[in-house]
Image: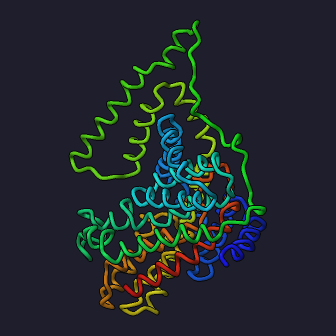
Amino acid sequence: MLRVLSRPATRLMERWLPDAFIFVIVLTLLAAVAAMATQGTSPVALVEMWGNGFWALLQFAMQMLLVLVTGFILASSPPIRRLLAAIAGLATSRGSAIILVTLVSLAASWLNWGFGLVVGAIFAKELARQIRVDYRLLVAAAYSGFVIWHGGLSGSIPLTIATEGHFTAEQIGVVSTSETIFSTWNLLIVLALVIAVPLVNRLMMPLEHEQVLVDPAQLGDTSQPHRLPPDATPAERLENSRILMWLIGVPGLIWLAFYFAGGGGINLNVVNFLFLSLGILCHGTARSLLSALDEGVRGGAGIVIQFPFYAGIMAIMTDSGLAASLSEWFVSISTAQTLPFWSFISAGIVNIFVPSGGGQWAVQAPVMLPAAEALGADIQRVVMGVAWGDAWTNLLQPFWALPMLGIAGLKARDIMGFCVIQLLTTGIIIGALLYLL
């Protein structure tokens, strides 16, 4: 059944879904038209909002580029490649490969969303080297595991409200992660997804004659050792010095040990620093690391050029009041029991235009929290409804797929047909459990 449904969905996306850069331009125009039609915003004001916000994500864009590059450096190092190859060896068939890559991505994304994006892509490439399986579905399966991230350890919204002095502290106080991430009902949602997402991916697997395969030789291999020639120059010896790499890699890990011992939390800078320090040590030489860097950075072009456009869209959505109006409409049709569900749906829609958990919470919190208090709804469930909605429509939004697509060497249209099926199934699961639990 799901295989049959995935065929037209895949054909539709391959035919009609443009490059991710065209997608962000279309989203910009849609946001502008919606703001003019529903908020009465003038074209001049829209241009001003868009231009003022265009560069607001520069720091975040650099962080995301480093997530891709440092993650690729680490994952392509000889020790990690051997580990991934060993794990990939557990897959003995096409179906087991699809299930395995999904489970690895789910686990990694629950631990940290950036880690999940990179590990999922690298592991998918490793499986493609060993097993003849549809490469589009393999990468889509890796990306589908990302849906779990906001219910995991790096969920930005639950971590924000668990922090002293957060911007909604006067309304709801500090909410422990034991009431959000580690609550019984949230863990049940996570468990349901861990069961359902791999199963759905397996059921979508094309028949053998319908597969789109990739030549393993085209996947690249940065793990080949670089041998130092006998007549190496001093510069070449420095480039291949293990001592030099240890002198810079070990201090990085020492700093991280002190940081975590002092109660420091996980954020993008810490993840990137960890990946880079481990990558330096695992590659052993600057020459090996730089070879991996050359390959890894090629996939970063989409991040560099598209993130400013998404910052512009976020500015239009927030400054025009469009995002708040959308949230208010869903609140108007909600009851105490249904508000977590409608928070989930509204967050999913807003996320298509504002694909940033922290930015989205800043937009929706001033609407959702007073509504929860007025209706007597469970605030923790409303908060996690927004969090899960933010994660859910990432399956339709190529923004977060850019790092994974860059590593895998695919375009958004190659995987989105499969992701649409996952969007529907995970939406039903998460929405139903938010309503029933």
Could you tell me which residue is drawn at 40 percent across and 83 percent down? 340
What x and y, as percent, mark residue 304?
A: 59, 48
Nearer-the-camera pick, 46 or 116: 116
Determine whether 126 is above or below 49 in the image: above
Could you tell me which residue is drawn at 76 percent across and 69 percent down? 11
What x and y, as percent, mark residue 295?
A: 61, 37
What x and y, as percent, mark residue 186?
A: 36, 74
Side of 118 where 370 appears, left or right? left
Q: Residue furthest left?
A: 262
Determine whether 323 is above or below 208 in the image: below
Q: Is residue 80 visible?
A: yes
What x and y, as percent, mark residue 279?
A: 45, 36
Side of 36 where 345 appears, left or right? left
Could you tell me which residue is drawn at 72 percent across and 49 percent down? 214
Nearer-the-camera pick, 55 or 241: 241
Could you tell me which residue is drawn at 37 percent across and 52 percent down? 267
